[in-house]
Amino acid sequence: MAHPKRKISKTRRDKRRTHVKASAPSLVTCPTTGELHMPHRAFWYEGKLYYKGKVVMEKEVLA
């Protein structure tokens, strides 16, 4: 197994890590409902599940 010959300083380690950042998820607008959602994902809107602008499923209301 490889072992480092010298300890990597905190400064050097942190310089490398500055490039690793979390990015905001990209969002698209549904053509049917106008809601923002993640692309290629189904989403709920007013009790209905939408995917590619079409209703896939409706939520059942149990009384």
Image (spheres, rainbow, N blue to C red):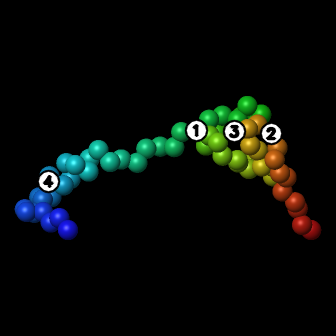
- Circle 4 is placed at which residue position? 11
Q: Amino acid at mark 1?
A: Leu
| In contact (CB < 8 Å): disc 4 and disc 3 | no
x, y percentage for residue 22? Answer: 40, 48
Distance (Cα) linking label 4 and label 3: 44 Å
- Lower position in the chain sequence, tag 4 or tag 1: 4
Q: Residue at x 82, y 43 (%)?
A: 55
- Circle 1 is placed at which residue position? 27
Label 3's element? loop
| In contact (CB < 8 Å): disc 2 and disc 3 | no
**Nearer the observer, disc 3 or disc 1?**
1
Dot 3, how many residues are within 10 Å of its Cα: few (below 14), some (14-19), or many (20+)?
few
Residue 58 showing in the rendered view: yes
- Lower position in the chain sequence, tag 4 or tag 3: 4
Dot 2, how many residues are within 10 Å of its Cα: few (below 14), some (14-19), or many (20+)?
some
Q: Residue at x 76, y 37 (%)?
A: 53
Q: Quadrant of residue 50?
A: top right
- Circle 3 is placed at which residue position? 35
Which sits in the foreground, 20 or 44? Answer: 20
